[in-house]
Image: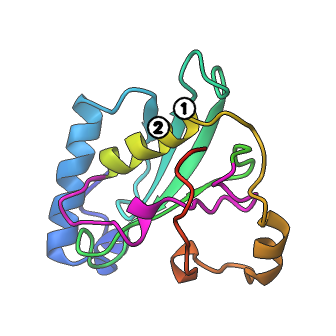
């Protein structure tokens, strides 16, 4: 990943670029356990491999997260979705959208991508069932093609899955 990519820099503020370069260096030297960053030349869009934790429903499974950092990161949360196929989980829709408060209402500029990833891994690891969200079909029907999950009004009412 090169920091001099003009196409990347156009979409990010200087603060966002500096923060992402720092986070990128941290990922290179000390990535969170269970994750691997697939390096590209785009600082604004990352692909992260997620490896299921041994002893959980997702052991020996690998998924990919697509992370898009907004212009004003870290003041605004990144958009994080699972690429197809998304894991079967009560809080992950089949289009990859994730119902997790730290991605939306509970985001703080003090958070980093690594903390989001650990929250996602914890959510997967604590699940007792592999199933789609109960409202998956309804959500997909009402979720227009290309719509960002950040446009959804999420209700965070179930943390027992």
State the image quarter where residue 137 is shown.
bottom right
State the image quarter where residue 64 is shown.
top right
Asked whether 156 or 131 is in front, the reply is 156
Quote the CA–CA distance across marks 2 and 1.
Answer: 5 Å
> Which percent across, then down, holds residue 93?
71, 59
Seen in the image, is 136 located left or right of residue 27? right
State whether residue 20 is above or below residue 148: above
- Please indicate, yes or no, whether residue 57 appears anywhere in the rendered image: yes
* Secondary element type, mark 1: helix
Residue under label 1, please give it: 125
Q: Are marks 2 and 1 in contact (CB under 8 Å)?
A: yes
State whether residue 15 is above or below residue 62: below
> Which percent across, then down, holds residue 12?
28, 76
Residue placed at 58% from the left, 80% from the top? 152
Seen in the image, is 114 located left or right of residue 40? left
Residue placed at 40% from the left, 55% from the top? 41
Seen in the image, is 103 located left or right of residue 124? left
* Secondary element type, mark 2: helix
Residue placed at 59% from the left, 15% from the top? 55
Numbered range of the magenta stretch = 90-112
Q: Main secondary structure of the magenta part?
A: loop
> Which percent across, then down, holds residue 95?
73, 62
Asked whether 24 or 111 is in front, the reply is 111
Residue under label 2, please give it: 122
Confirm whether the magenta stretch covers residue 92: yes
């Amino acid at each position: 990943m090169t920091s001099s990519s003009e196409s990347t820099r156009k979409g990010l503020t200087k603060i966002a670029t500096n923060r992402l370069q720092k986070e990128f260096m941290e990922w290179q030297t000390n990535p969170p356990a269970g994750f691997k960053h697939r390096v590209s030349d785009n600082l604004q869009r990352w692909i992260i491999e997620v490896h299921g934790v041994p002893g959980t429903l997702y052991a020996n499974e690998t998924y990919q997260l697509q992370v898009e950092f907004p212009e004003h990161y870290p003041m605004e949360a990144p958009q994080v979705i699972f690429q197809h196929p998304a894991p079967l989980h009560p809080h992950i829709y089949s289009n990859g959208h994730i119902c997790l408060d730290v991605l939306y209402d509970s985001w703080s500029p003090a958070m980093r991508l690594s903390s989001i990833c650990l929250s996602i891994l914890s959510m997967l690891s604590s699940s007792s069932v592999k199933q789609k969200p109960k409202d998956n079909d309804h959500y997909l029907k009402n979720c227009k093609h290309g719509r960002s999950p950040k446009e959804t009004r999420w209700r965070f009412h179930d943390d027992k899955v």
